Amino acid sequence: MSQRYCLTLDLKDDAALIAEYEKYHQAIWPEIHDSIIAKGITKMEIYRFDTRMFMIMEVDDTFSFEKSAALDAANPKVKEWEDLMWGFQSPVKNAPAGAKWVLMDKIFSL
């Protein structure tokens, strides 16, 4: 059974940095792709409006945020990617200290 999570993040307000960030995401590193799949994420999409990012993740029943964090912490290539991406990213207002992508609350469904 799959579940969907929606998360948000901001990018730094710099057109050149945004273009570079999008270029990285046109061809993510193979190790990052493999890491995403290993976590139980079956589908991931990222959308952007101006500097606001919106991620939709569909996950299987093996996924948990705790497992995801543990796998990331044990993977030097993921750490390298995340450190690189943080150069483009900014936390959203009221994000917990150190948080990047922040889980959004569902407020409507049709």
Image: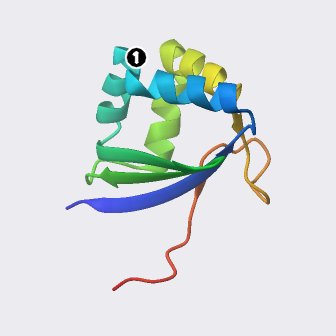
Asked if residue 16 lies left or right of residue 79, the reply is right
Q: Position of residue 71 (x, y in %)?
A: 45, 29
Q: Position of residue 91 (x, y in %)?
A: 73, 46
Residue 88 can be seen in this image: no
Of residue 14 and residue 5, the one placed in the foreground of this image is 14
Residue shown at 38% from the left, 51% from the top: 57
The percent coordinates of residue 93 (x first, y second) are: 78, 57
Other residues around mark 1 within 10 Å, as few (<14) / some (14–19) / many (≥20): some
Q: Residue at x 55, y 71 (%)?
A: 105
Q: Compare residues 24 and 67 and report the one nearer the observer.
A: 24
User: Which residue bears the numbered disc 1?
Assistant: 29
Q: Does residue 57 appear left or right of residue 52 in this picture?
A: left
Toward which corner of the image does residue 26 lie, by quadrant? Answer: top left
**Which quadrant is home to the C terminus?**
bottom left
Q: Amino acid at mark 1?
A: Trp
Residue 10 in view in this figure: yes
Query: Can you say which quadrant of the picture contains the N terminus?
Result: bottom left
Depth check: give the residue in front, 76 or 52: 52
Q: In the image, is 87 to the left or to the right of 49?
A: right
- Picture residue at 29% right of the left edge, 47% below the top: 62
Q: Residue at x 56, y 64 (%)?
A: 104
**Is residue 57 placed above or below 13 in the rendered structure?**
below
Locate residue 72, reporting x and y percent: 50, 28
- Local SS, label 1: loop
Above or below, 108 against 33 in this view is below
